[in-house]
Image (spheres, rainbow, N blue to C red):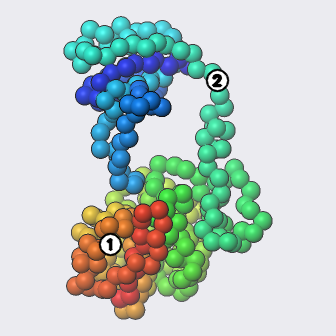
């Protein structure tokens, strides 16, 4: 493998990155060329959302190619282009071979939800104290237990077991909340998402964990549920207020996540015509909000 290193101004980052991908770069990443100097700049964005800009005032763009020849050919094709104005080639360097699978796996350790409830990747042994375990590997769908919003939802399920209840996981992603609900005694679980890939991932993850859930697109959700779970983001949660509350059974639990602390008031207002939302948990700038039907 060979890494092509380029220096470019902020306004060229997006075009240059797109061009490198079109030239069959295996990966493209962007760094602050002034990192660790007095000119270093921070790009602050909302948690879980893309940064506000594509790059820094002086950005280092790194593109990985299979061969040295492919990297040289990319340079030859890029240099005459208008969008390459102001850019410079820093060099091409060989990248040491690594066991990328092992390296990736090492970044994902078992995640504690409570003292005895853990999310454990398939390549790890469960901790000795784990009495309830969900096996889940990082994949295409959101929800592996590493994000604060997912952890808070799982904690809520573990401390408020939906035993005997019908549960709806709306925007299920990996299906982790639906699997947890089934593990903690739900009588039936419907897991829905607008992304067909997430629906497939949820079904596969449920099968791998030996639980039965129904998965599908949002129209699968019919009738009322004793617990309605939705870990999405604040804006779609506000739009979904009448729909989610229409699925909530009298006395049932509504559990919402994907909400920044500063957005709690907006959610309370959006749901006020239907239920009275309260903040039930906080972690790393995010909140979990719950209500009773």
Q: Where residue 195 appears, x then y in whole percent?
A: 36, 55
Residue at left offset 40%, top offset 18%: 6
Q: Quadrant of the C terminus?
A: bottom left
Q: Disc 2 versus disc 1: distance between alpha carbons?
A: 47 Å
Q: In terms of depth relative to the viewer, which is nearer, 123 or 55?
A: 55
- Read off the residue under disc 2: 97
Q: Where residue 271 appears, x then y in whole percent?
A: 27, 79
Left or right side of 252 for 2:
right
- Can I make out residue 245 in this image? yes
Q: Which mark is residue 264?
A: 1
Q: Which mark is residue 130?
A: none
Q: Quadrant of the N terminus?
A: top right
Residue at left offset 66%, top offset 44%: 106
Q: Where residue 3 appears, x then y in whole percent?
A: 50, 19
Residue 77 location, quadrant:
top left
Marks 2/1 in contact by CB < 8 Å: the verdict is: no
Dot 2 crowding, Cα within 10 Å, few <14, some 14–19, many 20+: few
Residue 279 location, quadrant:
bottom left
- On screen, 80 above or below 9? above
């Amino acid at each position: 493998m060979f890494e092509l290193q380029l220096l470019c101004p902020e306004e060229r980052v997006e075009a240059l990155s797109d061009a490198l991908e079109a030239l069959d770069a295996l990966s493209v990443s962007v760094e602050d060329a002034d990192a660790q100097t007095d000119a270093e700049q921070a790009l602050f964005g909302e948690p879980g959302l893309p940064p506000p800009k594509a790059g820094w005032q002086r950005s280092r763009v790194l593109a990985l190619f299979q061969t040295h020849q492919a990297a040289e050919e990319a340079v030859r094709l890029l240099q005459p282009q208008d969008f390459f104005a102001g850019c410079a080639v820093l060099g091409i360097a060989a990248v040491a071979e690594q066991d990328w699978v092992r390296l990736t796996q090492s970044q994902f350790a078992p995640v504690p939800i409570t003292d005895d409830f853990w999310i454990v990747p398939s390549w790890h042994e469960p901790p000795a104290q784990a009495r309830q375990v969900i096996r889940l590997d990082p994949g295409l769908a959101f929800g592996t237990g590493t994000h604060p919003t997912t952890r808070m939802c799982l904690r809520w399920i573990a401390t408020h077991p939906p035993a005997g209840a019908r549960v709806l996981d709306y925007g299920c992603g990996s299906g982790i909340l639906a699997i947890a609900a089934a593990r903690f005694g739900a009588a039936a679980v419907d897991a829905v998402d607008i992304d067909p890939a997430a629906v497939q991932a949820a079904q596969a993850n449920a099968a791998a964990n030996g639980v039965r859930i129904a998965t599908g697109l949002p129209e699968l959700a019919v009738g009322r549920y004793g617990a309605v779970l939705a870990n999405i983001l604040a804006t779609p949660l506000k739009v979904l207020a009448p729909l989610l509350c229409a699925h909530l059974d009298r006395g049932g639990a509504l559990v919402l996540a994907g909400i920044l602390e500063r957005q709690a008031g907006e959610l309370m207002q959006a749901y006020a015509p239907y239920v009275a939302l309260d903040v039930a948990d906080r972690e790393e700038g995010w909140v979990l909000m719950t209500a009773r039907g």
